[in-house]
Image: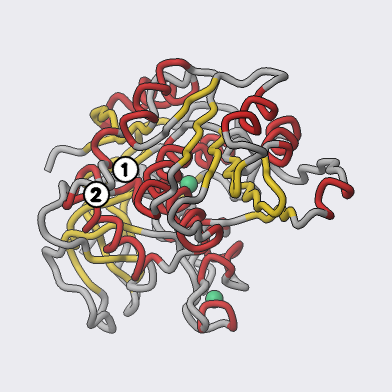
Amino acid sequence: MTRTATAAVLRAHGTAPVLETVTVPELRPDEVLVRIAGVGVCHTDLTAAAGGVPLPLPAVLGHEGSGIVAEIGSGVTELAVGDAVVLGFDSCRTCRNCSRGRPAYCTRFAPLNYGGRRVDGSTTLLDAAGEPVHGNWFGQSSFSSLVVATARNTVRLPDGVPVALAGPLGCGLQTGAGTVLHTLRPEPGSSIAVFGLGAVGMAAITAAKIAGCNTIVGIDPNPRRHDLAGRLGATAVLSPDDRTARQIRDLTGGGVDFAVESVGSEAVIRQALSSLASPGTCATLGLRAGRNPITVDQTHLLSGRTLTGVIEGDADPHRFLPQLARWWREGSFPVDALVQTFPFEKFGDALAAVEAGEVVKAVLTFEQ
Ligand SMILES: [Zn+2]
Ligand SMILES: [Zn+2]
């Protein structure tokens, strides 16, 4: 059986992906065919489209997909046709880090998520001329109405959450929330500053509230983000300038216990470090293309301060995504407050809104 799908195909870096008809070949035994209901736009998609990630072209991006299982490979036992699922990043599930529950640091993370091909070298997509199109971007390439994923990165959703809006759980929201809950692990009553109030930062604020932080400072130059951060749990919101670190130290009687830095620029990392108490820990998350050298003051670190980096919230999607969905259903992790939907045909409008900072999280939806 050959299946056709509509996908946004990137043919040259720096150009806009164009909607094309693609075909999806027969599934391998470990694969899952998912009919996508919605897919979030993540900044890493934009970084890759600009050429910042060595993904071979032509390719289909998109890595915050959710939808309904349409078919399973012969070896898949943990999923069934009709299951509502959210897709996470791919990981081998067998290496040293995967075996100890830390698949975000899978030793095969780069080839599995950025390689554009299956392990056997074939591609999961063909264009109208029958030529290979690279899929497997984060194990999914979900800017497409049909996606070939695997049982490794397909996670069944609990009942009672809107499937079409669940995709951002799989990357941006998992990243922000996991960084707080798995890496920083604030005790109740702690203080935290979150630099950058995109979807990642908003998820960090929400998780900080869930963890019981009593001082939560959000920092973002876009004033349209400030009200939402407050509704999610921020106790103070600042627009950044030269005095930001001092303001945070004043607000908190000497500095915050924790900082989340979701921008990735040297200036913001330095500001986040300067806002820390002693001791204190800053986690940096924002992916910049290629190398990103920064200078930090070793003297400042000596007083028990830590700078660490985190991928995908150091989460195992099979455990963490259902947890986030249950918090969403219970009202403590309101994904729908972060999301603005666009029909998939309005792909260009969604990308423009993301690039202009007009939406916290754009989700492209497909007619089911
Ligand atoms: Zn692994
Ligand atoms: Zn992402």
Identify whether 234 is placed above or below 348.
below
Which image quarter: residue 30?
A: bottom left
Residue 218 point in image, percent of width and height: 50, 31
* Residue of label 1: 39
Residue 229 point in image, percent of width and height: 39, 30
Q: How many marks?
A: 2
The amino acid type found where label 2 is placed reads Ile
> What's the colour scheme?
secondary structure
Identify whether 125 is placed above or below 203.
below
Residue 357 point in image, percent of width and height: 46, 21
Identify whether 29 is placed above or below 193.
below
Q: Is residue 7 visible?
A: yes
The amino acid type found where label 1 is placed reads Val
Tell me how far mark 2 sits from mark 1, CA to CA.
Answer: 7 Å
Residue 36 shows which numbered tag? Answer: 2
Q: Observer-nearest residue: 95 or 127?
A: 95
| Mark 2 crowdedness (10 Å alpha carbons): few <14, some 14-19, many ≥20 | many
| Quadrant of the rendering where the C terminus is positioned | top left
Side of 255 where 330 appears, left or right:
left
Residue 111 shows which numbered tag? Answer: none
Identify whether 322 is placed above or below 296.
below
Disc 2 and disc 1 in contact, CB within 8 angstroms: yes
Question: Where in the image, quadrant-wise, is ligand 1 located?
Answer: bottom right
Side of 203 where 105 appears, left or right:
right
**What residue do we see at 45% from left, 15% from top?**
223
**What residue do we see at 52% from left, 37% from top?**
11
**What residue do we see at 45% from left, 60% from top?**
89
> Could you tell me which secondary element the residue under label 2 belongs to?
strand
| Quadrant of the rendering where the N terminus is positioned | bottom left
**What residue do we see at 55% from left, 39% from top?**
193
> Could you tell me which secondary element the residue under label 1 belongs to?
strand
| Mark 1 crowdedness (10 Å alpha carbons): few <14, some 14-19, many ≥20 | many
